[in-house]
């Protein structure tokens, strides 16, 4: 039996993409080990059909975190029997590359984003240059590479003159929960900069539509302050991080989902968020940006209201417009149900298994 080690710097309980990948590979006959990190507020690992490991570091972010995590990751990878190692994003690639080379393993690279183009690095050019040097050295030296959408595959293929396959973040198919549609807007995901969350809160102020923010992140304290400043505490609920099952319950009861991003970051402009498909799988129309990947999918099934720019007044008008047009809402929801039969992991996983068949 071939053994695969997958490494990521997330808390494994909330990383749905990596859970799906690990399940698919394990069910396909591989012996899978998924390695992540422990945070201060991490709960016990959920039971899985594959092996899970979490590394503890004394630091939560910054150079010392990445350095210590990669050191610990390297020694763990060296201690485990494996035939292949997969580095998930650039921040695990140094340790994975070194371990794979020393052990004679195949090295896979799963790029979830344009790591060097995230807003946090665009504002820190010196740090960004360091990550660019790491990327320029290691990415051309992996054996196989894949990413989450065609736009990112084209970007990386052009930059490094090598093929990048596409394995999109489709959810497992779910039976639509037969619950009455709620009256709240739902945002699910990390509460980080560049995700239109300040714009959303100002739109909530203008529309008086309740909103639930399901997630946590660097921006959480700022958003709590902004809710108080706008005097909308009665309209906005922060849930913190939720398990996938609990999150799906919130999504299934929402009125609409929110998936907004700033266009100034290439990482966001060419993104295809997990939440896009999660909203569709729950049968919920959503508001998202008119970026390339969403326009591509919208051409197949019209499931969203596309926003050309991030502006509170425009978002508020669009929300109220859909609220006053039940026929359009019904059509979007019906399109979600149709798309939910096709945009599923059970079909998308075949692309993943073809890649790992190289073993």
Image: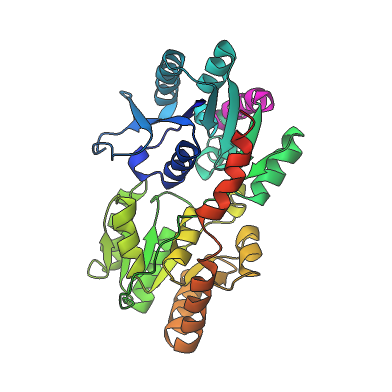
Question: Residue 352's spot in the image, x, y percent?
Answer: 58, 42
Depicted 242 relative to depicted 327: above or below: above
Depicted 52 relative to depicted 76: above or below: below
The number of numbered badges drawn on the structure is 0
Name the residue rendered at 32%, 57% in the picture. Answer: 247
Q: Nearer the viewer, residue 39 or 337?
A: 337
Quadrant for the C terminus, please: top right
Q: Is residue 5 left or right of residue 139?
A: left
Looking at the rendering, the stretch of residues picked out in magenta corresponds to 127-142
Name of the residue lying farthest toward the top: 102
Question: Residue 289's spot in the image, x, y percent?
Answer: 56, 64
Q: Nearer the viewer, residue 229 or 223?
A: 223
Depicted 313 relative to depicted 226: above or below: below
Q: Is residue 43 left or right of residue 123?
A: left
The chief SS type of the magenta part is helix
Question: Residue 85's spot in the image, x, y percent?
Answer: 53, 25
Residue 137 counted in the magenta span:
yes
Name the residue rendered at 52%, 22% in the picture. Answer: 96
Residue 143 counted in the magenta span:
no
For the question of whether residue 325 can be seen, the reply is no
For the question of whether residue 262 can be seen, the reply is yes
Name the residue rendered at 49%, 31% in the picture. Answer: 30
- Quadrant in which residue 43 is drawn: top left
> How is the model colour-coded?
rainbow
């Amino acid at each position: 039996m071939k053994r695969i080690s997958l490494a990521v710097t997330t808390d494994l309980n909330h990383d749905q993409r990596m859970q799906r990948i690990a399940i698919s590979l394990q069910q396909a006959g591989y012996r899978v080990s998924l390695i992540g990190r422990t945070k201060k507020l991490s709960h016990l690992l959920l039971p899985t059909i594959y092996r899970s490991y979490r590394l503890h570091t004394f630091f939560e972010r910054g150079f010392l975190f990445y350095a210590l995590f990669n050191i610990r990751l390297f020694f763990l990878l060296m201690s485990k029997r494996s035939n292949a190692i997969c580095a998930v994003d650039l921040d695990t690639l140094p340790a994975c590359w070194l371990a794979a080379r020393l052990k004679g393993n195949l090295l896979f690279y799963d790029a979830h984003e344009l790591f060097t183009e995230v807003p946090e690095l665009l504002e820190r050019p010196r740090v960004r240059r360091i990550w660019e040097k790491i990327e320029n050295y290691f990415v051309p030296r992996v054996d196989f590479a894949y990413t989450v959408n065609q736009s990112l595959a084209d970007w990386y293929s052009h930059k490094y003159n090598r093929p990048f396959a596409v394995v999109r973040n489709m959810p497992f198919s779910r039976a639509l929960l037969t619950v009455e549609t709620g009256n709240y807007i739902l945002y699910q995901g990390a509460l980080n900069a560049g995700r239109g969350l300040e714009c959303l809160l100002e739109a909530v102020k203008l529309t008086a539509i309740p909103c639930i923010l399901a997630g946590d992140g660097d921006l959480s304290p700022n958003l709590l302050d902004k809710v108080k400043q706008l005097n909308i505490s009665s309209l906005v609920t922060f849930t913190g991080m939720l398990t996938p099952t609990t999150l799906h319950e919130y999504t299934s009861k929402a009125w609409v989902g929110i998936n907004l991003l700033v266009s100034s970051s290439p990482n966001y402009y060419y993104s295809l968020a997990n939440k896009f498909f999660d909203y569709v799988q729950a049968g919920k129309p959503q508001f998202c940006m008119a970026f390339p990947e969403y326009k591509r999918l919208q051409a197949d099934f019209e499931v969203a209201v596309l926003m050309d720019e991030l502006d509170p007044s425009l978002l508020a008008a669009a929300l109220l417009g859909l609220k006053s047009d039940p026929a359009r809402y019904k059509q979007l929801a019906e399109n979600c149900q149709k798309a939910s039969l096709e945009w599923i992991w059970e079909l998308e996983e075949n692309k993943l298994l073809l890649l790992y068949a190289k073993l």
